[in-house]
Image (cartoon, rainbow, N blue to C red):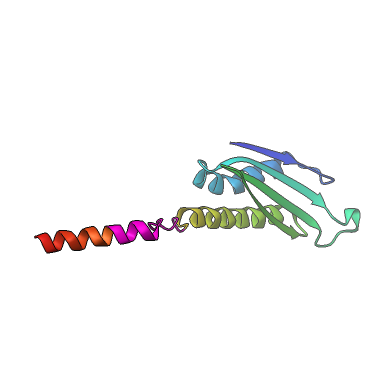
């Protein structure tokens, strides 16, 4: 599983990179057969002005061709990563459960003539018995 970290305008230290990998490990392990690729993007929305402005957006590509996005914003980049990882885990689980419990296609009903023939055959069989 490949995790691509795109720093945006927020520098990513080795400590932050390790934090990202540790926080994404549980959801990635849990859904390793479903997730093909993960992209993490960190952005400082306000720049040097400070405030609640570190955004972490995680994009997960699932097989066959579905994309799940989770994001969080906080004053601390570590907290934003942790929250986004939890949201990703929840969203991937929901997508997986929905797909696993999807309603099967309704059985095809025979056409009217075929249904009448089947009923008549059944009635004839009952009478002859």
Task: Specify whether 125 is left or right of 46.
Answer: left
Look at 89% across and 53% down and name the residue there: 47
Task: Specify whether 59 is left or right of 30.
Answer: right
Q: Could you say which is closer to the camera, residue 105 or residue 42?
A: 105
The reply to whether the magenta stretch includes residue 106 is: yes
Magenta segment boundaries in residue numbering: 103-117
- Which quadrant holds the C terminus? bottom left
- Which quadrant holds the N terminus? top right
Q: Which quarter of the picture shows residue 105?
A: bottom left
Count of numbered badges drawn on the protein: 0
Look at 51% across and 52% down and name the residue there: 96
Rendered location of residue 120, percent (x, y): 25, 61
The reply to whether the magenta stretch includes residue 87 is: no
Q: Could you say which is closer to the camera, residue 26 or residue 32?
A: 32
Rendered location of residue 119, percent (x, y): 26, 62
- Magenta-drawn stretch, dominant element (helix, strand or loop): loop
Rendered location of residue 58, percent (x, y): 68, 49
Q: Could you say which is closer to the camera, residue 129 or residue 99?
A: 129
Task: Specify whether 33 is left or right of 71.
Answer: left
Q: Residue furthest left?
A: 129
Look at 60% across and 56% down and name the residue there: 86
Q: Residue furthest top?
A: 2
Look at 31% across and 61% down and name the residue there: 116
Q: Which quarter of the picture shows residue 126?
A: bottom left
């Amino acid at each position: 599983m490949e995790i691509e970290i795109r720093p945006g305008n927020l520098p990513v230290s080795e400590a932050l990179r390790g934090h990202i990998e540790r926080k994404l490990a549980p959801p990635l392990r849990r859904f390793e057969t479903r997730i093909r690729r993960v992209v993490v993007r960190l952005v400082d929305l306000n720049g040097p002005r400070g405030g609640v402005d570190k955004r972490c957006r995680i994009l997960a590509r699932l097989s066959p061709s579905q994309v799940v996005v989770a994001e969080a914003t906080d004053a601390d980049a570590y907290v934003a990563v942790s929250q986004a990882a939890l949201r990703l885990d929840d969203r991937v689980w929901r997508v997986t459960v929905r797909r696993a419990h999807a309603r099967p296609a309704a059985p095809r009903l025979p056409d009217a003539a075929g249904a009448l023939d089947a009923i008549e055959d059944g009635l004839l069989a009952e009478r002859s018995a």
